[in-house]
């Protein structure tokens, strides 16, 4: 053979044997069918069987009309997916090939060219299978058979000698909300819900990378890059960290390598409101003889996070210290933003997280009944300075603890932690949502007639899963700087006094207990991780519930079908009667329901923030929806801000001035969650009637007052600033100013409930400033102005005061804008 040809052949052969080839099978032509039928239909991957049935016009859209009920049969069927893909001779030259499923929902059998490769039983696990020996040149067939998760769950439940609540969902490692919740439909899915990949590789490859932060000062960050490498052939290899080479002798099989890395003058990752969430790219490359075998890039943030729990005279603290400073957590709870998670786009993730940031939030709790979210969710949180409280996916039931279940969970925890551990946004890992409380407080043992031994077994299983298996697995994988674990949220149920003196609290005396909103002023815990109230979505979203012409009426069966709480309408209406006049008109009812929701949450948040530092966190339920629905969300399924979200943007501002009325006195609280301190602050208070006339002015004692975190002013006797007879037609405006006279915070206080205010008809005028900006004005107080139109308004549901021009930005130009105010609802 010609020597030059031989050299070229050996060079090409060397390149083939050195490099990894990653190939997606997601874009291949996929088909699916019911296992009981013969006809194959087109399918989309990633996807779910419901989406494929919709695309093939076999079922109607479950989100519309009352179609949810018409598709329940799907959960009891078995489904099959297949595709054919070609393999070239060049690909087969590689030494090894791995077939990787990033998400299979849930019980499946995987066949390649007729060979059963693996059975799966967990939606949340990554399945990686060595397949080189099963591949052939030319056409290859991949087939996945899915068994009904409901039938499998029932079979597993039948092996337990007592009835488990919410059975069979707790026996199935899949998204629990798919079985139905009081804000979501029952749509139990199956299918290939994440990407499918085929990786060809040679010699060795990077398996897992974790980056430990050993120390962090202003001068230097010391990191420890820990890599897991699987080598098919032993020998000398190079690992490059940001192009700096390190040589290692690798043995055949698994290898764990540690490489130190220093960053000079590090820029900190800061939570929203404290500074920029600075990020660093760490590129890790595995090479052999200068040829790249495998490489990954991890984006990290340099920060410290500690969960502080210290005993004090009131109980025990519960707060996060970030970069050495106590952080007041302001935010919300997150549920999956679609019942069919494969269609949650990168853009939707980024918009919702940006909406949270724009509402001055710094933390989101990922609720344990949904999914471990896509990488794009955590990337968006990283980039926007939003800390993540990450639940493991267990919620509101009892869970088994047999060996198979525990081993399955252990692998699930390994997979998810390995995927997510380097995200700087993750602040805490929490074992579950409300399971400790369910065991102790919800009366399931009595309902299902448990014996004493049954009850002891439930508690024993709980301890095994959430106090042993999960935290022990975390310790195996996570570096110490990232291993913050909290077994259950809440730690103590809301009916117990201790829930307000230690741990985190879910307070549901409002809504479930039907207590008045004002009870929030008394029920303040150390960290409020759940509380909420329902409100209707936007009119656009209400219309989207209908497949045909919308019939917007509270009596319409379609509207009723999109309220999943059995007493939802009754509770909303009862609370509405307390604070507002209840309109008969549907549009006005929708408007008032949103105001009601915002009013309740404002009272809660202000009570929490006034209690700083006793209280150090407030996360309302919930940010988003998984379908068009009447719910606790502040942003509806279509992405529209409800009145609640606009209110939270105001209530979560870094500096606020808050008031508490009690026994004829007003107490004022200046709260500062930012990094800047304010010297010699003063509080100006004005009593103003609804025509805009200032009736009285006063200044609260401000001599030498410094606002660092919270500042309390001397109480003000109400009768000294406003007569009893004027309370229905007068409000207070209070302005906190710094020593230069600049306003730090402004707020308003109305003495009466909205239904009792003596409002007069406002003459609201809209002036077009530019194509995407308007100015709005009024002659008298216009309370709770609601701008209606197909655009996003920079502010909405606001009080408009006479003598001012309020400027509003529009996300897109709008020709016609309708306006409602509270006065319009008081006339019915």
Image (cartoon, grey):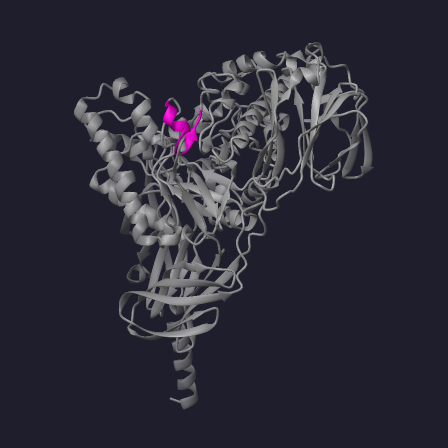
Relative height, residue 559 to residue 773 (above, below): above
Say which residue appears at 54% left-offset and 32% top-offset: 609
Residue farthest toward the left in the current orientation of the protein: 453
Q: Which of 658 and 187 is in front in this view?
A: 658
Q: Nearer the viewer, residue 318 or 810?
A: 318
Picture coordinates of residue 795 (x, y %)? 69, 33
Left/right of residue 622 with respect to residue 232 in the rendered view: right
Q: How many labels does the image show?
A: 0
Picture coordinates of residue 281 (x, y %)? 51, 61
Left/right of residue 183 with respect to residue 739 in the rendered view: left
Quarter-of-image position of residue 431 = top left
| Magenta segment includes 454 | no
Quarter-of-image position of residue 579 = top right
Relative height, residue 659 to residue 476 (above, below): above
Say which residue appears at 39% left-offset and 28% top-offset: 499
Picture coordinates of residue 142 (x, y %)? 36, 51
Q: Can residue 44 be seen in this view?
A: no
Q: The N terminus appears in which quarter of the rendering?
A: bottom left
Picture coordinates of residue 683 (x, y %)? 68, 31
Which residue range is magenta in the image? 496-507
Q: The C terminus appears in which quarter of the rendering?
A: top right
Q: Nearer the viewer, residue 290 or 438?
A: 438
| Magenta segment includes 497 | yes
């Amino acid at each position: 053979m010609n020597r030059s040809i031989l050299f070229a052949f050996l060079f090409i052969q060397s390149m083939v044997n050195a490099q990894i080839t990653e190939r997606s099978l997601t874009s291949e032509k996929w088909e699916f069918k019911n296992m009981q039928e013969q006809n194959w239909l087109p399918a989309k991957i990633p996807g779910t069987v419901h989406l494929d049935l919709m695309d093939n016009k076999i079922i109607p859209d479950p989100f519309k009309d009352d179609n949810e009920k018409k598709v329940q049969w799907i959960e009891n069927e078995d489904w099959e997916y297949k595709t054919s893909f070609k393999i070239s001779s060049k690909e087969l030259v590689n030494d090894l090939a791995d077939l990787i499923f990033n998400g299979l929902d849930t019980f499946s059998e995987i066949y390649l060219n007729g060979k059963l490769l693996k059975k799966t039983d967990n939606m949340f696990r990554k399945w990686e299978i060595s397949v080189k020996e099963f591949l052939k040149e030319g056409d290859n067939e991949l087939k996945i058979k899915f068994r009904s998760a409901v039938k499998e769950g029932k079979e597993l439940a039948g092996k337990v000698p007592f009835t488990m609540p919410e059975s069979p969902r707790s026996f199935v490692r899949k998204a629990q909300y798919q079985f139905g919740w009081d804000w979501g439909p029952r749509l139990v899915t199956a299918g290939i819900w994440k990407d499918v990949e085929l990786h060809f590789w040679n010699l060795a490859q990077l398996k897992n990378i974790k980056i430990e932060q050993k120390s962090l000062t202003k001068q230097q960050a010391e990191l420890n890059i820990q890599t897991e490498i699987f080598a098919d052939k032993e020998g000398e290899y190079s690992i490059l960290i940001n192009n700096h080479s390190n040589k290692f002798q690798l043995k055949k099989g698994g290898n764990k390598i540690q490489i130190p890395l220093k960053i000079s003058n590090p820029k900190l990752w800061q939570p929203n409101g404290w500074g920029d969430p600075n990020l660093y790219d760490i590129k890790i490359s595995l090479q052999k003889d200068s040829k790249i075998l495998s490489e990954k890039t991890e984006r990290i943030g340099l920060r410290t996070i500690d969960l502080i729990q210290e005993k004090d005279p009131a109980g025990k603290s519960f707060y996060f210290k970030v970069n050495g400073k106590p952080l007041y957590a302001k935010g919300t709870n997150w549920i999956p933003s679609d019942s069919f998670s494969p269609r949650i786009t990168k853009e939707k993730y980024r918009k919702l997280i940006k909406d949270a940031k724009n509402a001055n939030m710094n933390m989101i709790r990922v609720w344990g009944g949904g999914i471990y979210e896509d990488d794009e969710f955590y990337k968006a949180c990283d980039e926007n300075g939003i800390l993540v409280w990450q639940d493991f996916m267990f919620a509101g039931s009892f869970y088994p603890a047999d060996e198979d279940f525990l081993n399955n969970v252990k692998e699930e925890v390994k997979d998810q932690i390995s995927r997510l551990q380097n995200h700087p946004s993750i602040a805490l890992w929490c074992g579950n949502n409300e399971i400790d409380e369910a065991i102790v407080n919800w009366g399931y043992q009595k309902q299902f007639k448990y014996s004493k031994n049954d009850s002891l077994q439930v508690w024993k299983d709980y301890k095994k899963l959430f106090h042993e298996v999960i935290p022990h697995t975390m310790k195996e994988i996570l570096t110490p700087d990232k291993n913050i674990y909290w077994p259950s949220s809440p730690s103590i149920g809301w009916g117990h006094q201790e829930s307000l003196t230690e741990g985190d609290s879910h307070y549901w005396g409002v809504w479930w207990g039907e207590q008045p909103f004002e009870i929030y002023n008394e029920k303040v815990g150390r960290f409020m991780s759940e509380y909420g109230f329902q409100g209707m979505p936007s009119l656009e979203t209400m219309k989207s519930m209908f497949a045909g012409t919308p019939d917007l009426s509270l009596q319409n069966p379609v509207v009723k079908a999109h309220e999943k709480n059995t007493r939802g309408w009754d509770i909303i209406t009862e609370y509405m009667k307390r604070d507002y006049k209840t309109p008969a008109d549907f549009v006005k009812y929708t408007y008032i329901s949103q105001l009601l929701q915002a009013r309740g949450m404002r009272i809660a948040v202000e009570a929490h923030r006034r209690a700083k530092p006793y209280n150090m966190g407030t996360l309302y339920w919930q940010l988003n929806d998984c379908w068009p629905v009447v719910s606790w969300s502040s942003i509806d399924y279509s992405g529209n801000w409800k009145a609640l979200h606009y209110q939270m943007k105001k209530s979560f501002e870094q500096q606020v001035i808050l008031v508490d009325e009690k026994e004829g006195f007003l107490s004022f609280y200046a709260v500062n969650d930012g990094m800047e301190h304010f010297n010699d602050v003063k509080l100006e208070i004005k009593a103003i009637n609804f025509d805009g006339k200032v009736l009285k002015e006063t200044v609260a004692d401000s001599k030498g007052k410094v606002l660092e975190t919270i500042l309390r002013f001397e109480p003000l006797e109400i009768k000294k600033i406003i007569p009893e007879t004027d309370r229905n037609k007068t409000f207070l405006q209070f302005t906190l100013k710094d020593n230069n006279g600049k306003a730090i915070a402004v707020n308003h206080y109305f003495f009466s409930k909205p239904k009792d205010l003596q409002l007069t008809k406002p003459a609201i005028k809209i002036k077009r400033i530019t194509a995407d900006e308007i100015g709005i004005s009024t002659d008298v107080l216009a309370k709770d102005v609601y701008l209606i139109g197909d655009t996003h308004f920079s502010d909405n549901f606001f009080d408009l005061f006479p003598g001012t021009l309020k400027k509003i930005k529009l996300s897109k130009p709008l020709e016609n804008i309708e306006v409602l105010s509270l006065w319009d609802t008081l006339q019915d």
